[in-house]
Image (cartoon, helix red, strand yellow):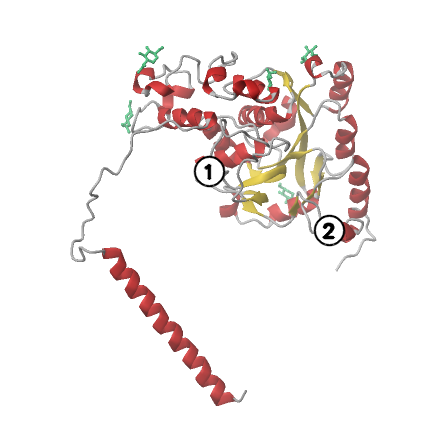
Amino acid sequence: MHGPRRKMKVAGTIMTVNIFLFIVLEVSRSGGQGKGGDSKLNVPSKRFWARLAPSTGFWNREQQKLDLLHNPVVTNFSAGVTAGGALPFDLLPDWLNDTVGLESCEPDPRVALQLKDYNQLPQRFKDFLSYLRCRSYPLVVDQPHICQDGGPFLLLAIKSLMPHFDRRQAIRESWGRAGLLANRTVATVFLLGNATAEDHFPDLSAMLQYESAAHRDLLQWDYRDTFFNLTVKEVLFQHWVDTSCPRVSFIFKGDDDVFVNTPRILDFLKGLPPAKSRDLFIGDVITHAGPHRDKRVKYYIPETMFVGMYPPYAGGGGYLYSGDLARRLHAVSHQVALYPIDDVYTGMCLRKLGLAPEKHKGFRTFDVEEKFRGNPCTYKGLMLVHPRTPQDMIKIWGWLNDPKLTCQ
Ligand SMILES: *[C@@H]1O[C@H](CO)[C@@H](O)[C@H](O)[C@H]1NC(C)=O
Ligand SMILES: *[C@@H]1O[C@H](CO)[C@@H](O)[C@H](O)[C@H]1NC(C)=O
Ligand SMILES: *[C@@H]1O[C@H](CO)[C@@H](O)[C@H](O)[C@H]1NC(C)=O
Ligand SMILES: *[C@@H]1O[C@H](CO)[C@@H](O)[C@H](O)[C@H]1NC(C)=O
Ligand SMILES: *[C@@H]1O[C@H](CO)[C@@H](O)[C@H](O)[C@H]1NC(C)=O
């Protein structure tokens, strides 16, 4: 196209866009005023609030109760409730009134009556629901030395299960090696519950004791370590950070079947502007998701238990967040009813804080394309890849630390 004609065409396009914008703005201005165009005040014709009605989901009703109890305008009990203050029972509508304590560890007999399909639910739901309010179990193995002297800069907190000895050892020998890395202190802890006889586990306690003495990196709480109790692991860990590691700068929390490029994470944190680091929460973020209603899926949740959509959440394979945010998450968690899927629960707590996790393309919880998996350079720019075996972890770590490795 020739110069002048092209200029005219550009000018024409700009004018068309301007006219279009003008029309849109005019229409929306007049539209906003409605019929009574000259009255400035918008008086609702009907009552604009509604009496709080019970949700059809049991979890949602528990949450309605917590919301009400923590609403300072309604009860002004927000400070007293979680600190063990008296419950304002008589301020609650009948359907929310019960005598079981808010964070009680007694099995809750009400649930059997409050879900109409309770008897048909798989056992894991019954177990979860009757202990829904319990958030504290004894810490039986602790590592108070890990956060002495103000650190660490980065804490790697890895969800593991008692029998996964080889995964933990591979992590120690590769990406989870504790110490000084790129002039930053890195510490590693493995988060464990108990592999109980109830779930037919052999007695692993002597081996665990040996491991704990040799490596001093295990945290163990005495509760049944099951998939639906991972949220319990989350709140117990939050509590531990709050009380035993309050000055940690950043936390990576993830599974024991992932590869983490720890140097890449440190590099990312080094370049982070201070204003961004306070609210940092990044991972492989899932948005617009809701509960699975197919009984065969591991993540199945019945309608009688939860209705609605999930907030944006970072896949539990691994995410990175600030120590400052960890403390706020712990504080707000008392206002969020436990949910059996731990990463969704953390998303719910973030939403309660008015925050959302941020997607980072370096987190590959659904792996990279198969053809890239054997290429060392694939891992150079990534922060996390899932899943990887213990042998994979050691192999990839070797690649990344090979001085001869050159990537574009
Ligand atoms: C709640 O109570 C405290 C003192 O008991 C008072 O200072 C505060 O203003 C109250 N808040 C509301 C929202 O009423
Ligand atoms: C709620 O339960 C408490 C304790 O059981 C009772 O004292 C109170 O009267 C009940 N309130 C309502 C509105 O039912
Ligand atoms: C290492 O980190 C410390 C503080 O964390 C800092 O004072 C020192 O300058 C750093 N050294 C190098 C070589 O970057
Ligand atoms: C864990 O479970 C085992 C087997 O059920 C039990 O003997 C043990 O007391 C439990 N607690 C701990 C801390 O190991
Ligand atoms: C969670 O742990 C508690 C305490 O060990 C146990 O009673 C409960 O059955 C567990 N819940 C699930 C869903 O496994």
Task: Point out residue 178 in the picture as x, y percentages from the top left corner.
Answer: 71, 34
Mark 1 Cα shell of 10 Å, populated few (<14), some (14-19), many (≥20): some
Residue 291 vs 231, above or below: the answer is: below
Mark 2 Cα shell of 10 Å, populated few (<14), some (14-19), many (≥20): few
Residue 39 vs 155, above or below: the answer is: below
Q: Is mark 2 within 8 Å of ligand 5?
A: no
Q: Quadrant of residue 51?
A: top left
Residue furthest to the left: 38
Residue kind at label 1, given as amino acid type:
Arg
Residue bearing the label numbered 2: 369
Residue kind at label 2, given as amino acid type:
Glu
Where does ligand 3 appear, by image quarter?
Answer: top right
Task: Point out residue 39 in the picture as x, y percentages from the top left corner.
Answer: 16, 54
Viewport quadrant of the N terminus: bottom right
Q: Secondary structure at mark 2?
A: loop
Residue at 48% from the left image edge and 21% from the top image edge: 115
Q: Nearer the viewer, residue 104 or 81?
A: 104
Residue bearing the label numbered 1: 351
Lower sequence index among marks 1 and 2:
1
Q: Is residue 312 left or right of residue 93?
A: right
Task: Point out residue 225 in the picture as x, y percentages from the top left corner.
Answer: 65, 21
Task: Point out residue 256 in the picture as x, y percentages from the top left corner.
Answer: 71, 33
* Mark 1 or mark 2, whichever is nearer to me: 2
